[in-house]
Image (tube, helix red, strand yellow):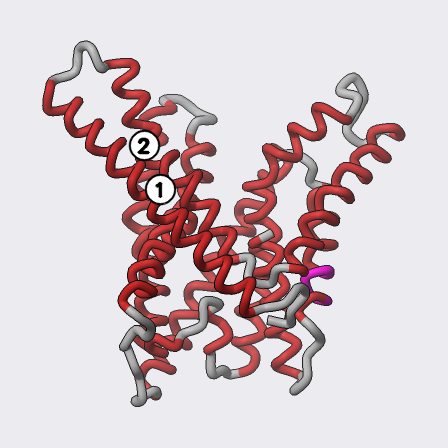
């Protein structure tokens, strides 16, 4: 749903470049959902994405380069920047925990490199190389864009950074088009395991994926899946809040708590006291962080429910 909203915002920004009164966001959300459906229908499995990963890398690098060029230009031209964070102290604290959830969600992109690296031996060594690359070079670009965006526009910067770009028009259009296309590939990477689970349950595995009977079943399964997600994304245009909620109660414990629990379960009896103390600290700290970030995410959702109405043109 978060990806659908991202794609919809990108399309609306493109329309805004050519019209002073663009269509409602919901129109673009429907178009995005339809595009995701078509892609998932013709590229049904994660293994079928092989030829698309190179295109994804090109899109990502192009997006980053274009964005950095405009950010530097805008940052130099913008002399009226305000870096103060508004709101009460309580609000600032909750927003900080929400930011932690968002950061963790953003960095799960490293999963793609890690999964790919297990396809050849030695799997563990390759996984480590992939992760080292993700959290050095990858982090430099992730946070380079974030820091430059904040430097260029101050605390009023939009959560969807391309909204703030000053142009030229062709770069604004190209950046948003890249965002839309990349969202199609990215969402499929994350959703593919769900597709394959549904396919295993509802398709006849004895027949080909696009055989007559499976063709109809695949169309129905993908149609129901994306129709439901598109409807909810259109109804709740602040879906980014739900992404934070996902990060808070699932990715925080999965990233920090679960590995330490596995270590204690497997090596708890033979590990040194210092190692066990370290992993227990990780478990307890992650548990408290999960509670804090989840409360922050729920609070933000409640605030936005009061602020927006269903199917708001956000």
| Horizontal and vertical percent position of residue 72 | 34, 77
Q: Which residue is mark 1?
A: 290
Residue drawn 67% across and 60% down?
Answer: 234
Q: Nearer the viewer, residue 70 or 280?
A: 280
Q: Is residue 33 left or right of residue 306?
A: right
User: Is residue 138 positioned above or below 80 on the image?
Assistant: above
Chain part drawn in magenta: 27-31
The outermost residue toward the top is: 269
| Horizontal and vertical percent position of residue 111 | 43, 38
| Horizontal and vertical percent position of residue 201 | 72, 24
Residue drawn 74% across and 49% down?
Answer: 227
Count of number-bearing discs: 2
Q: Which numbered dot is residue 300?
A: none
Q: Nearer the viewer, residue 258 or 128?
A: 258
Residue drawn 31% across and 84% down?
Answer: 81
Q: Tell whether position 221 is magenta.
A: no
């Amino acid at each position: 749903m978060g990806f659908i909203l991202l794609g919809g915002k990108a399309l609306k920004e493109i329309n805004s470049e050519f019209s002073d009164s663009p269509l409602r966001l919901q129109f673009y959300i429907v178009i995005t959902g339809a595009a995701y459906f078509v892609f998932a229908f013709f590229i049904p499995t994660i293994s079928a994405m092989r030829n698309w990963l190179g295109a994804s890398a090109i899109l990502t690098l192009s997006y980053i380069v274009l964005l950095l060029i405009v950010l530097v230009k805008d940052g130099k031209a913008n002399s009226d920047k305000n870096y103060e964070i508004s709101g009460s102290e309580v609000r600032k604290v909750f927003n900080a925990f929400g930011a932690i959830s968002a950061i963790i969600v953003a960095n799960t992109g490293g999963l793609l490199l890690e999964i790919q690296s297990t396809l050849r031996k030695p799997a563990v060594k390759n996984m480590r190389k992939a992760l080292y690359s993700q959290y050095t070079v990858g982090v430099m670009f992730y946070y380079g864009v974030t820091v430059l965006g904040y430097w260029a526009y101050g605390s009023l910067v939009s959560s969807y950074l391309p909204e703030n770009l000053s142009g030229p028009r062709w770069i604004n259009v190209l950046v948003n088009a890249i965002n839309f296309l990349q969202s199609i590939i990215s969402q499929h990477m994350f959703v593919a395991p769900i597709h394959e689970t549904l396919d295993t349950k509802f398709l006849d595995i004895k027949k080909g994926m696009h055989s007559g009977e499976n063709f109809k079943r695949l169309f129905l399964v993908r149609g129901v899946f994306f129709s439901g997600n598109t409807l909810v994304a259109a109804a709740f245009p602040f879906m980014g809040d739900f992404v934070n909620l996902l990060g808070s109660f699932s990715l925080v414990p999965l990233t920090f708590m679960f590995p330490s629990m596995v270590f204690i379960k497997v090596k708890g009896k033979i590990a040194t006291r210092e190692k066990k103390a370290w992993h227990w600290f990780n478990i307890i700290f992650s548990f408290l962080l999960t509670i804090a970030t989840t409360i922050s995410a729920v609070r933000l959702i409640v605030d936005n429910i009061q602020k927006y109405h269903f199917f708001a043109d956000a």
